Amino acid sequence: MKSMTGYGEAAAQGTQAKIAVQVRTLNHRHLDIQLRAPREYLSLEEEIRKTIRERISRGRVEMFITRALLRGQGRKLELDEGLLRQYFISLRRAKRKFGLKGEVDISLCSNLPELFQLGEAEVKEEDERRLVLRTLDLALRNLERSREREGRHLKKDVRLQVRELRKMSGRLCGEAEKISARLKDLLSVKAAGNALEEQRETSEASSLNFKGDIHEEVVRLKTHVGELARLIDEPGPAGKKVDFLLQEIQRELNTISSKAPHLSVVQLVLMGKEKVEKIREQAQNLE
């Protein structure tokens, strides 16, 4: 069981640059990937997203990838040799034509900044691809450890609430047996045809709000609670399944309180709903 919230980071250095990957995850009903990466890695974006999808099934993922060039691996100075050749040819021609004195030498270059251009260092794509994916893997591993650590805390609390739900459903089972017994007595009275006794029993049943047998609902409730207890100990994503089971438990509790709305049953149902709500709050954080 993992939490949807967590944080992980990693950094690695190659021949040209140092790569840093930071990733954090937040609660979200579906998988929502927000990726920020340098333009040099646009061709890797889909591969990065695929790697994330293979490791994370639900939640908002915010990932930041930064690239810092190593010293001496940044922009490079490029000489426009064609333009420089034209300068030399033109100056020599002018010297001959007008009888000028002096030599054309390298000092000319320092006075002609347009001869030079700053260019970006060529990216070694395959080397940096391996570096990025390796760093990404390390960051996701650290994220997973963070989510598992938080998941253990969530699991401990959910398990406690499930234990209380089991106690509550066991007590409801006892109430269901009492109601079944009372309804059988009423049927026996009717079958005997004792009008006076039937009237007295019917009046008593009405005062206790017996509207029907809740045995089937209680059995389903216990089944759902047992499945919930089993589910939280299973490996892998459980958030959506837990949420579905909580809906089923809530439905059974509503039906039980509607069919047998007297005090002892209502108190147990309210207790169960409180535990369901606490689990639901935690389940919103589960992957």
Image (cartoon, rainbow, N blue to C red):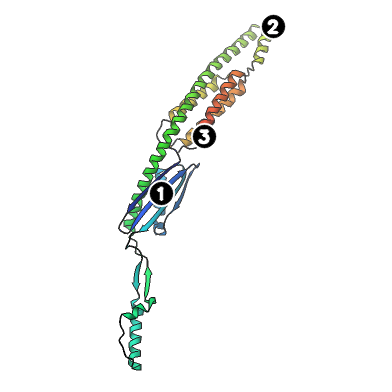
Location of residue 59 in the rendering, given as x and y in whole percent from the top left corner: 47, 43
Q: Amino acid at mark 3?
A: Glu
Which of discs 1 and 3 lies nearer the camera? The answer is 1
Location of residue 20 in the rendering, given as x and y in whole percent from the top left corner: 37, 52
Q: Is residue 38 in view?
A: yes
Which of discs 2 and 3 lies nearer the camera? The answer is 3
Left or right: 12 as drawn, with respect to 213: left
Q: Amino acid at mark 1?
A: Gln
> If you read the primary sequence from the N terminus, does the residue marked by circle 1 or circle 2 appear first?
1
Element assignment for label 1: strand
Element assignment for label 2: helix
Location of residue 96 in the rendering, given as x and y in whole percent from the top left corner: 32, 92
Element assignment for label 3: helix
The residue carrying pointer 2 sits among few (fewer than 14), some (14 to 19) or many (20 or more) residues within 10 Å by Cα, namely: few
Mark 2–mark 3 Cα distance, whole angstroms, equals 53 Å
Dots 1, 2 in contact, CB < 8 A: no
Q: Which residue is the site of mark 3?
A: 281
Label disc, if present, on residue 196 of the rendered structure: 2
Quadrant for the C terminus in the image: top left
Q: Which residue is the site of mark 1?
A: 22
Left or right: 10 as drawn, with respect to 214: left
Which of discs 1 and 2 lies nearer the camera? The answer is 1
